[in-house]
Image (tube, rainbow, N blue to C red):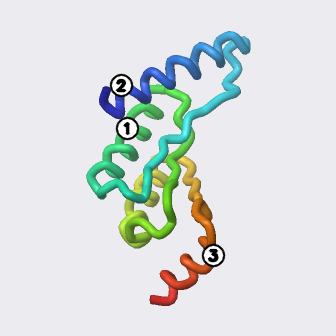
Amino acid sequence: MSREEYLRVVLGEVNDYNSIRGGERKVGVIVSMDRKMDGFAMEECVALAKKLKEEGEPVVGVDLCGNPTAGDPKTFKRHFEEAKKAGLGVTLHIAEVSDATALMQKRSSS
């Protein structure tokens, strides 16, 4: 199953839920990107989030998740900028491993 197929299944369920709530949008979808993903996969996630939002689907943002010691934070910046330009929200998870604060401090000082 491709990322797009997966997102469309999730969005179908979200839309079903929203429709039983009288059409009032109560639930939105945040497309997650794991820090272990390469730039091409992250680019695909942002492009899908933008496309689905433009189609009227309840996609509200993108998220960066996963081990904060993985990946290079500088490479995430352009993907977040692209998402923000498209009107998508951005969320970040930064403490998903034990002693994450010390790890992040060490990485930011290098």
Position in image of residue 64 (x %, y %): 50, 55
Q: Secondary structure at mark 2?
A: helix
Give how far apart the Cα atoms at labels 1 and 3 are: 32 Å
Position in image of residue 106 (x %, y %): 52, 85
Residue at 60% x, 71% y: name it. Answer: 100
Q: Is residue 47 above or below residue 100?
A: above
Q: CB atoms at circles 2 and 3 under 8 Å apart? A: no
Q: Residue 29 appears in which quarter of the rendering?
A: top right
Residue flagged by tag 1: what amino acid is it? Leu
Relative placement, left or right, of 95 versus 62 is right
| Residue sitting nearer the eye, 95 or 92 | 95
| Residue sitting nearer the eye, 94 or 84 | 94
Q: Residue furthest bottom?
A: 109
Q: Nearer the viewer, mark 1 or mark 3?
A: 3
Q: Nearer the viewer, mark 2 or mark 3?
A: 3
Residue flagged by tag 3: what amino acid is it? Thr
Residue flagged by tag 2: what amino acid is it? Glu
Quarter of the figure that contains the N terminus: top left
CA neighbours of label 2 inside 10 A, class few (<14), some (14 to 19), many (20+):
few
> On the image, numbered disc 2 is attached to which residue?
5
Which one is earlier in the sequence, the residue at label 2 or at label 3?
2
Q: Secondary structure at mark 3?
A: helix
Q: Residue furthest left?
A: 40
In the rendering, which numbered label is found on residue 101?
A: 3
CA neighbours of label 3 inside 10 A, class few (<14), some (14 to 19), many (20+):
some
Q: Secondary structure at mark 1?
A: helix
Position in image of residue 6 (x %, y %): 40, 27
Which one is earlier in the sequence, the residue at label 1 or at label 3?
1
Residue at 39% x, 70% y: name it. Answer: 72
In the rendering, which numbered label is found on residue 48?
A: 1
Give how far apart the Cα atoms at labels 1 and 2 are: 10 Å
Position in image of residue 15 (x %, y %): 57, 18
